[in-house]
Amino acid sequence: MKLDVNKQYSGFVIRQAAYIDEIQSEAYVMEHTYSGARLLYLGNNDDNKVFSISFRTPPYDDTGVAHILEHSVLCGSRKYRLKEPFVELVKGSMNTFLNAMTYPDKTMYPVASRNAKDFQNLMDVYLDAVFYPLIYENPYTLRQEGWHYNIEAPTDALSYNGVVYNEMKGVFSSADALLDYEAMKALFPDTPYSFESGGHPDAIPELTQEAFEHFHTTYYSPENSFIYLYGDMEIETTLQYLNDEYLSGFKRTGAVNSEIPLQNAFARTQEVLGTYPVGADEATEDKTYHELHIVTGDARDVKTSMALRVLESVLLEGNSAPLRLALLQSGVAKDISGSYAGSYRQPIFSIKAAGSKPEQRDKFISIIYHTLQQLTINGIDKELLEAHLNYLEFKLREADFGAYPKGLIYGISVMDSWLYDGDPLAGLRYTEALQQLREGIKTRYYEQLIENYLLDNTHKVIVTLNPEQGKEEREQEVLAEKMAALKASMDTETIAQNIELCSELHKRQAAADTAEALETIPLLERSDIRREVEVTETVLKQLGTNDILYVPAFTNKIAYLNWYFDLTGIDKDLLPYCYLLSDVLGKFNTDKYTYQELATASNKYTGGVSFQMHAYSAADDANDYTIKFTVQAKALTANLDKLFDILQAVALGSKIDDAKRLQEILDEVKTDWDSSFFSRGRL
């Protein structure tokens, strides 16, 4: 059903209504007048319904209170007085997504399900968790999820323990985490972005119960919330539920100040020098990181943000990227990458060199500026711009996010503007912006972006991280000495109290939930589950000795093609080389294309081509498996001839005997593996 602008529905006033053709949804921006809650509903016929409630949570120190609170509100609430309601809920849920995420300036609690009753259950457990957590009556929540003194006997050494504390200890052993931490401190010294929302291990033990509760009281209120609904649902019934069960219990105060302030631009580029840990016996040669971070504009400027994403891709992604190639060919590093972080009040454009040397820093910067200046003078390759713009449009229109519901990704993306009081619908309406960006190829629009945002802009930081042998071991020694001194400063009574607190925490963790508490968890019954099986229509044909499986489906004129080559019987000693082949295919010159031209053609005419190794187990026996070399590709049906031309060139014309090029690819692959070894957890 359609909702009318300025009309009130269960306390919600419709402020804006529009049909978003790009995602085939009726969009409604609402405000709950009593509590001040904001709500966006994207109504459509997608039965994979999504709900999320998010809060603007700017940190004011490095204690990780936002991250710890994200964990803690999920440890029992007013209605659901269990240790971990979600563990029990999942046992009887058909959710397609259930998680919570801490970002540098917001905390999100999204869920999704295709079952209407399940969706209602998930919403209720999440809303009760965020508004009525048990953290005020259970101080052991902070000790478990955040930190506590770990000591079980008077003679034991004192140490720190806690879920988030241990998680962030792992995160900060990563060079990437340290690069980001140093960069954000330097880029935004006067805003909340200078602090680590996930928590720095050195600061997490400074978080008190009082500060923990204060953060929740301050930011977890409806007037600081952003509620998102997506999919096919009875929206009036849902709005009434939100009003009656939760929002009507909170009156708007006008006292919440969570706005993210702007950082004033610098007069000159800042420089940061630091180290990251490697093993005491690990080689340090060619393991330096150099990274240039540039603050670029305003997240609410959707067109410019989209243009800068395209520009980052053109300059730094793929084998035809001119800035990446210039840096690699100079020998300044073994791997070059870039990123555009648009989910900040002030987005960040970054250029990273991995596998470098300390003395290469000035050369790294010099090549960046020289290459960018040459591009502004001579112009960017228009075919390259068109190729990356085509690829961006393909991804936007395809809206394929793998295992993640597309409604979930839309909900995350709208926050890039909505969180900063911009129009949440602006980023969903991408057709006009794409057309303007396409027109910009005919002018100096992209060259002007380079001049304005990358060259003439002084709001920059250069971070250099050098490997330091044994750093982590030395830090552990310093921490051990600190803990020993701390224990020595405690009297016998204080030590006994900490032993008792630790013991009580362990008892609570080991104790089972009561039957009464377990009965409060809303679970699905068989009668709530649709019994009809969804049948996927398939057509199996044979072409010579090959089987062809065709799956007819609506794909918005996109063809998806997968090839599976059976490697059964291959010598196990050759398997590593099969993996290597999957890494290097498509990156060599061919008889028809240079590897740069190949990358451009792939972006211009396809939605991506990938080569991988997979092991597939039998349906009835996990130990019975076959190994396949797979090729996955997708393109608009109108471009299938171009796709097959690219694949033929790679399969039959790749010059894989080019030893110099092979070494370059191997250096990139190895450096990328080294950089990606540690995951960046924030869950």
Image (spheres, helix red, strand yellow):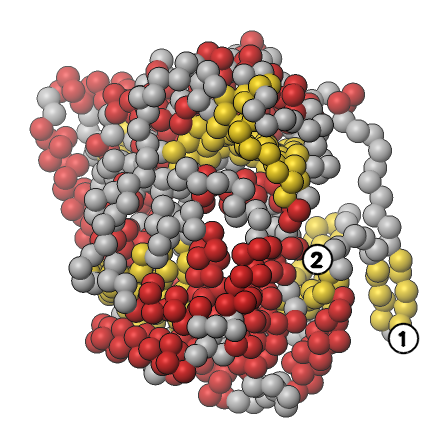
Q: How many marks?
A: 2
Residue at the spot x=19%, y=29% of the render? 155
Residue 373, compared with residue 276, is above or below; it is below
In the displayed structure, does residue 532 sit left or right of residue 85?
right
Quarter residue 631 falls in: bottom right
- The numbered mark at residue 544 is 1
Q: Answer yes or no: is residue 244 visible.
A: yes
Residue at the spot x=50%, y=83% of the render? 662
Q: Nearer the viewer, residue 592 or 482?
A: 592
x%, y% of residue 464? 24, 64
Residue 220, compared with residue 345, is above or below; it is above
Residue highlighted by disc 2? 616
Residue at disc 1, secondary structure: loop
Quarter residue 289 falls in: bottom left
In the displayed structure, does residue 405 sit left or right of residue 637?
left
x%, y% of residue 163? 37, 35
Quadrant in which the N terminus is drawn: top right
For disc 2, the neighbor class at 10 Å (few under 14, some 14 to 19, many from 20) is few
Residue at the spot x=23%, y=50% of the render? 264
Residue 473, compared with residue 191, is above or below; it is below
Residue kind at label 2, given as amino acid type: Tyr
Q: CA distance from mark 1 to mark 2?
A: 24 Å
Quarter residue 192 falls in: top left
Quadrant in which the C terminus is drawn: top left
x%, y% of residue 406? 62, 45
Residue kind at label 1, given as amino acid type: Gly
User: Which label sits in the foreground, 1 or 2?
Assistant: 1
* Labels 1 and 2 touching (C-beta < 8 A): no
Residue at the spot x=28%, y=63% of the render? 457
**Sooner in the amino-acid sequence: mark 1 or mark 2:** 1
x%, y% of residue 644? 73, 76
